[in-house]
Image: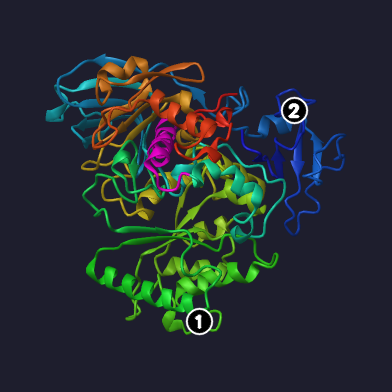
Amino acid sequence: MRRIRWACGAVSLSIAAAGCPGPMMEEPDASVVWADHGLPGDEDAWAPDAFVPEGTDANFPDAYVVPVDAARADDAYFAGDAGMIPTDRSEPAAPSTVERMGTSGLLLRGTVLTPTGPLVPGEVLVVGNTIQCVAASCASHPMAADATIVNTNSTISPGLIDGHNHATYDFLPEWVAGSLFDSRYDWRGDAAYSAHISPESDGGTRGEMVCPATKWAELRSIVHGTTTIQGQSPRQACVDRLARNADHYHGLPSRTNTSFGTSIAGPCEGTVGSATATAMNDTWRMARIADWVAGDVTRLAVHMGEGVRGMGATRTNVLREYDCYRGQATGGTSGDHMIDLLENDAGMPYGTAYFIHGTALTAAQIDEAAADGAFFIWSPSSNMILYGATTDIGHMIDVGAVVGIGPDWTVSGEDDVLGEMRFGYEYGRGEGIASLTPERLWLMATRDGARAVDLDADIGTIEVGKRADLVVFGRVSSDPYRAVLDSHSSDIRLVLIDGAGYYGDLALESATAVNGMCEDFSACGTAKFLCVAGTPGATARADETYESIRTQLYNILQTGYAGMPDTAYGRGAELQELVTCP
């Protein structure tokens, strides 16, 4: 359960980890803890009868308990809490069944979310790794005659795309800082934060940590319906591959493995303006131009403008990042030394800018970047937890910017893309952003996410000729996008990557599984299969199972690293499981 949630029109945050009452229940006299996030204009957000509860955690002095009546409880959305999703939103679908075992291909029946809208009823025919037919009926297609037929009774979607994550940290639980920060320049130097992430940071680039941690993140993605992750994954053969990795090891022909670069501490960070930074910027800029001209680089992902406008001593650092990446003079240096991700010397759009966060961007900067072909990634849960504010997402949508979505990491964000979508939806309701509909959030996680990571030629939509990265969400609704939004790991009926099943209901394993090495897995009491060992592309540690990966991570948290006795953390119980159950 996240520390922060939005709900039903209140411009407030629910903080469940503040030493306050448990999650809101459906009874009319229930209460929930809210906390003022300190944004201008929110002074009237509180209910008139709000009060400070006895025993409120001193770390959250602005925490209040607001009595909840039946109408509010019915209107709110409570991601991850048992029984909290009102039945008029979506319902569990009837069981998915194998109607016929065939010898070639797979035919899925259900509600199909196509680029032109839901197809109800619809069918998707997959042969090998490719979608061959999308129609109300594929019966007349010559390749359908020998296909295995699965009646999903559910909602069929492209696999979700995680636009921003830090994969190697995702075995760690969330970090409770107890306060908000001005920008990432602040919390990264916090001693408590450094101690929290030490099981990851002490491991560095050691395969002992990198391999199981990255696999864990990719497995977490798969069991929640995500098939591609932009995860800053290490370029090590042990992670080639479970989920696709957009940086590399994606196994797709539309983009070379070297055409996506990621930078956290890029040359446009706090030291911009110094002689060292100027030289670094100059080198980077010339390299990017050369790469772009040669066609070798199509995206450069940068953490940019991550913080709150107008707050604290780090305000200058946050605000000047955009100017730097825009190629404009900043901090006394010449614009010729900046990294221009939006235009080349001839004034033509690069289309390489992949801006993560951008919480400090002004409307004018969003307009300019969107017009010049920049791509944006929204991580609202992490932004709200760390800064109490997030990107001007409503304006980005209004100007037609291409926006993907990602939870950032388990340390400060939601645990998976579905959780992030729900958080974004409730944020939109709280802020009155009508454009943040279930369909819009689904587009961020599919079509637009694929465009952002430059893999849309192969994935992101259900179309003939594209790769069969498909997810069956086991819920139904009059709004099929809501069926996706409401889903949890237990609702995921089937996850296909390249047409092969990696996760799903046990009843579908024999008809769809990628190989015969899959394991039984419980998603909060629902029996599933999960395929880990021997998956395609694996060239190192190919025999590792779910249990062996989990054991490796538990041992890191408990006893630390071999030859490093000072890393005996004694924190094995903190291992962040793949699935969090109520």
Count of numbered circles on the image: 2
**Mark seen at residue 423:** none
Vertically, is 160 above or below 322?
above
**Residue 204 lies in magenta, yes or no?**
yes
Task: State the CA–CA distance, disc 2 to disc 1.
Answer: 56 Å
In the image, what residue occupies the spot 65% across and 65% down?
Answer: 309
Q: Which residue is mark 2?
A: 70
For residue 182, side relative to residue 522 (left or right): right
Q: Secondary structure at mark 1?
A: loop
Residue 434 seen in the figure = no
| Horizontal and vertical percent position of residue 143 | 13, 29
| Horizontal and vertical percent position of residue 489 | 47, 27
Q: Secondary structure at mark 2?
A: helix
In the image, what residue occupies the spot 35% across and 49% down?
Answer: 450
| Horizontal and vertical percent position of residue 533 | 30, 27
| Amino acid type assigned to the residue bearing label 2 in the image | Ala
In the image, what residue occupies the spot 32% across and 72% down?
Answer: 287
| Amino acid type assigned to the residue bearing label 1 in the image | Ala
Q: Which residue is mark 1?
A: 329
Vertically, is 198 above or below 506?
below
Q: Nearer the viewer, mark 2 or mark 1?
A: 1
Q: Front-most of 496 and 314? A: 314
| Horizontal and vertical percent position of residue 473 | 42, 29
The quadrant where residue 472 appears? top left
**Residue 190 lies in magenta, yes or no?**
no
